[in-house]
Image (tube, grey):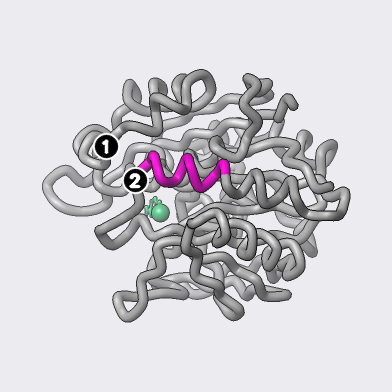
């Protein structure tokens, strides 16, 4: 049977992608940020999974106000990089895993979560920046990736509770796939940031670090946090953090092993948070 070996959490700031693509990682501004991912890149080499289930949000690249799926699973054989505004990053195409993705869709929908099945979808910085941070700049990504897009852009967005419960359904789905695949689940986006309006530039270190503490040790309680708390304390785009609860919900009920924790301000207008949790079953 397939199993979930670990979960990875990271911000997806598009300027990080630009810094990588333009060869700016050695600049004084960016050095401390990329240093925080050195351990992670080695860990990723030592613990390459068979598949990554990557929870992220689309930023009006594949979807728009014309169509707003709450939860969309990418079942295609491959996905092309694209981006809103900036155009596609020069990164490898993303190879999917249609068999596992279809199985997860079947299982999760039968567990009463309505997923949108997407057979053609471009993927933006929400997905490619986490891959770059964890895998560097390879010719090809080290394994297939199942993109799982969550609407955290246009209200109504799903609650933290629903995301957490969905993670548990995804765990049951993966663990019932009849092949011995090692699967990592990634939760991306966040941490505190607000990109527009009078509060643009908002960063809340205290909130972010309390979120990391609670995500590790008490995700059940964290899942009850209402939207308004994210928006008030972590800024309008801080709501991206509910996606981390999907990945955390997919972990076993035993306490995970904290392999790596990193927090850095600033990256563009954003606080960057990052965790690696290994699963204990
Ligand atoms: C920015 C955009 C994002 O989608 C994000 O999550 C963080 C920062 C930006 O434009 O700086
Ligand atoms: Fe974003």
Give the image location of residue 133, x and y in percent: 63, 46
Left or right of 204: which side holds 61?
right
The magenta segment is: 159-168
Q: Residue furthest right?
A: 180
Q: Nearer the viewer, residue 15 or 214?
A: 214
Task: Identify the residue at horizontal 36%, vertical 55% (top origin).
Answer: 152
Give the image location of residue 156, x and y in percent: 26, 58
Up the image or down, 75 lies above or below 230; here it is below
Where is mark 1, residue-wise?
226
Snapshot quadrant of residue 37: top right
Mark 2 Cα-neighbour bin, 10 Å: few <14, some 14–19, many ≥20: some
Up the image or down, 83 lies above or below 24; here it is below
Task: Identify the residue at horizontal 41%, vertical 45% (top origin).
Answer: 162
- Label 2 near label 1: C-beta < 8 Å? yes
Indicate yes or no: mark 1 CB to ligand 2 under 8 Å: no
Task: Identify the residue at horizontal 75%, vertical 37% (top origin).
Answer: 5
Q: Nearer the viewer, residue 248 or 12?
A: 248
Residue 76, magenta (yes or no): no
Up the image or down, 200 lies above or below 178; here it is above
Give the image location of residue 137, x and y in percent: 72, 55
Q: Nearer the viewer, residue 256 or 270?
A: 256
Image quarter (top left, top right, bottom left or bottom right) of the C terminus: top right
Left or right of 66: which side holds 252?
right
Residue 95 visible, this orientation: no
Residue 106 visible, this orientation: yes
N-terminal of the two: label 1 or label 2? 2
Where is mark 2, residue-wise?
159
Give the image location of residue 270, x and y in percent: 37, 42
């Amino acid at each position: 049977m397939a199993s979930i070996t670990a979960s990875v959490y990271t911000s997806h700031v598009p300027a990080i992608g630009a810094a990588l693509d333009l060869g700016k990682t050695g600049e004084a501004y960016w050095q401390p940020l990329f240093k925080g991912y050195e351990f992670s890149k080695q860990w990723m080499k030592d613990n390459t999974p068979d598949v990554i289930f990557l929870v992220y949000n689309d930023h009006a690249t594949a979807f728009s106000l014309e169509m707003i799926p709450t939860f969309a699973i990418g079942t295609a054989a491959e996905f092309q990089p694209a981006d809103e505004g900036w155009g596609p990053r020069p990164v490898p195409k993303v190879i999917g895993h249609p068999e596992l993705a279809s199985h997860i869709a079947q299982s999760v929908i039968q567990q009463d979560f309505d997923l949108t099945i997407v057979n053609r979808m471009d993927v933006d910085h929400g997905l490619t920046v986490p891959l770059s941070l964890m895998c560097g700049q390879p010719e090809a990504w080290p394994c297939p990736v199942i993109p799982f897009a969550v609407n955290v852009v246009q209200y109504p967005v799903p609650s933290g509770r629903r995301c957490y419960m969905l993670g548990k359904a995804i765990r049951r789905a993966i663990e019932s796939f009849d092949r011995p695949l090692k699967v990592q689940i990634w939760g991306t986006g966040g941490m505190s940031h607000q990109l527009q309006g009078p509060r643009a530039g908002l960063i809340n270190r205290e909130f972010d670090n309390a979120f990391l503490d609670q995500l590790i040790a008490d995700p059940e309680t964290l899942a009850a946090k209402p939207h308004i708390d994210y928006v008030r304390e972590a800024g309008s785009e801080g709501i991206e953090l509910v996606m981390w609860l999907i990945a955390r919900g997919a972990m076993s009920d035993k306490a995970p092993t904290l392999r790596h924790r990193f927090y850095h301000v600033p990256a563009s207008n954003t606080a960057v948070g990052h965790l690696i949790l290994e699963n204990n079953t």
